[in-house]
């Protein structure tokens, strides 16, 4: 960072600057633009979309980041409508979820009969679940997901339902993920209603607004991949709304006299008196702009550099956030020879000894993901239990995928894998562990102390696509409300 800078006038002033062109930033920006606010997005990469990236190879359509989301809030439907994007819903005939146990996949029960006949859970826990509605509420607010599930449902439900679910969502550890942070809806069912089962029934009977009726709980994608959504949002905003390939971005609050101090106490002077000064390098040149509002949507690990005015010790709550590393492998098969599984996918418990977290079957779920007679699989490997996988060579990964396809999925050897596409994500999924409360509180205090600053991204408010869309929409609404009174 450069000190002793005297800037007579920033190059340009915006109402809102958004840092990051991922789905959170895009959701924020398009909702702001809808209300006529002047918004500009700074993005470190040379492309728009963040972790969302879709690829087409022949008739195969695959992802390098998120494959699907869940319509668990109306903001998802509203963003698709706002961006003129078709919401791709799954094949209604594909409802099965599979769980790995005893060297084969079993169907996860979806009704009471299947729940009592499945071999996934012990008979003790099957009968024990009948008493779940009358079990005492938990008193430990920092109870782990593992402890909560063992207490209310039993160990086999933890091992063969919740554990693989967390492997698929968080690539994490049920023993260290804290329920009220990682699964707040589950936590609130017990705290508000005293029971998972009773709470779900009562919530289902509560009257819903027309807006809430949009929540279908279905998984979603978009035609030609999720990048269709981000591309359409970018098109709506216009190319002039983005500056890509930025480096060394820093944000400073500016007082009423127009002065800003960096971490070394050096003054930066501007003639105007906006709330924020932003510097960045693009195409080899340093630029200075100003804004009334700034929204960050980056990873927690970038905030120390991005917000240099924050005390180094105070920002430790961001630096301590652990991220699960995840490898994603897209597997294309041109001729599945009639063996394509009619299932959403299979999840694998962490104690199974496998380094694969789960395998999705996108071509079973959605039309157009593979050619007729072909199949597309997506395997996820690594996570907090097997971070070493990301350092393996492509040859080693190919051996694991052969094992997954021919032994775990039991496909005949005569079926040939056409191509593997391997994507490594060192910091894929933040883990909502015991330090999350400290981080959330620090974010709230920071936004309270520095009016006009909003900290978004998956370090707070959830990690799923729907969570990101809802957060972006919520931030936009706060800014719109604030700007109408300023």
Image (cartoon, grey):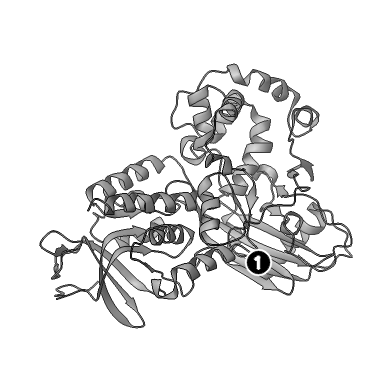
- The answer to whether residue 459 shows anywhere in this view is no
Q: Left or right: where does residue 345 sit relative to residue 482?
A: right
Residue 48 is situated, as x and y percent measured from the top left of the image, at: 48, 69
Residue that appears at 49% across and 37% down: 184
- The answer to whether residue 451 shows anywhere in this view is yes
Q: Left or right: where does residue 370 sit relative to residue 229?
A: right
Which of 301/62 is in front? 62
Disc 1 target residue: 224
Residue that appears at 52% across and 42% down: 211
Residue that appears at 78% across and 41% down: 106
Quadrant location, the N terminus: bottom left
Residue that appears at 46% across and 42% down: 433
Q: Left or right: where does residue 130 sit relative to residue 4?
A: right
Q: Quadrant of residue 441?
A: top left
Question: 10 Å neighbourhood of mark 1: few (<14), some, or many (≥20)?
Answer: some
Q: Secondary structure at mark 1?
A: loop
Residue 362 is situated, as x and y percent measured from the top left of the image, at: 71, 58
Q: In the current view of this chain or complex, which residue is farthest to the left? A: 257
Q: Quadrant of residue 442?
A: top left
Residue 169 is situated, as x and y percent measured from the top left of the image, at: 58, 48
Which of 244/482 is in front? 482
Residue 164 is situated, as x and y percent measured from the top left of the image, at: 65, 43
Q: Is residue 94 above or below residue 252?
A: above
Q: Left or right: where does residue 161 sit relative to residue 177?
A: right
- Label tally: 1
């Amino acid at each position: 960072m450069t000190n002793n800078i005297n800037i007579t006038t920033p190059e340009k002033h915006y109402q809102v600057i958004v840092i990051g062109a991922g789905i959170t930033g895009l959701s924020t920006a398009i909702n702001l633009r809808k209300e006529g606010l002047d918004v500009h997005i700074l993005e470190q990469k040379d492309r728009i979309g963040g972790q969302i990236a879709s690829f087409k190879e022949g008739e195969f359509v695959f992802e390098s980041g998120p494959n699907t989301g869940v319509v668990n809030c109306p903001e998802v439907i509203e963003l698709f409508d706002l961006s003129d994007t078709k919401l791709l819903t799954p094949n209604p005939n594909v409802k099965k979820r599979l769980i790995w146990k005893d060297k084969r996949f079993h169907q996860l029960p979806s009704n009471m009969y299947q729940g009592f006949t499945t071999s996934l859970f012990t008979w003790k826990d099957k009968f024990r679940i009948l008493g779940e509605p009358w079990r005492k509420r938990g008193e430990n607010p920092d109870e782990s997901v593992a402890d909560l599930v063992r207490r209310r449902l039993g160990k086999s439900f933890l091992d063969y339902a919740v554990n693989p679910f967390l492997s698929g969502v968080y690539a994490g550890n049920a023993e260290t993920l804290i329920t009220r942070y990682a699964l707040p809806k589950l936590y609130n069912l017990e705290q508000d209603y005293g029971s998972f089962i009773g709470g779900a029934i009562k919530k289902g009977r509560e009257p819903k607004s027309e807006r809430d009726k949009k929540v279908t709980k279905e998984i979603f994608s978009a035609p030609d991949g999720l990048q269709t959504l981000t591309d359409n949002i970018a098109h709506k905003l216009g190319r002039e709304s983005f500056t890509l390939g930025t480096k060394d971005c820093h944000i400073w609050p500016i007082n009423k006299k127009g002065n800003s101090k960096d971490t070394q106490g050096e003054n930066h002077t501007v003639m105007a008196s906006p709330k924020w000064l932003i510097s960045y390098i693009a195409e080899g040149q340093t630029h200075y702009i100003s804004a009334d509002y700034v929204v960050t949507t980056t990873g927690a690990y970038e905030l120390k550099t991005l917000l240099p005015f924050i005390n180094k010790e105070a920002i430790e709550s961001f630096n301590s956030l652990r991220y699960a590393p995840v490898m994603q492998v897209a597997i294309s098969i041109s001729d599945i020879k009639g063996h394509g599984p009619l299932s959403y996918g299979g999840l694998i418990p962490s104690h199974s000894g496998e380094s694969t977290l789960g395998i999705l079957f996108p071509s079973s779920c959605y039309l157009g993901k593979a050619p007729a007679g072909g199949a597309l699989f997506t395997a996820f490997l690594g996570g907090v239990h097997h971070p070493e996988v990301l350092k393996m060579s492509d040859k080693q990964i190919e051996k694991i995928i052969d094992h997954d396809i021919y032994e775990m999925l039991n496909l005949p050897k005569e079926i040939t894998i056409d191509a593997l596409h391997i994507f490594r994500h060192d910091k894929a999924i933040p883990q909502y562990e015991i330090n999350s409360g400290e981080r959330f509180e620090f974010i709230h205090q920071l936004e309270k102390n520095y009016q006009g600053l909003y900290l978004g991204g998956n370090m707070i408010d959830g990690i799923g696509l729907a969570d990101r869309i809802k957060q972006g929409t919520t931030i936009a609404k706060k800014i719109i409300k604030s700007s109408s009174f300023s």
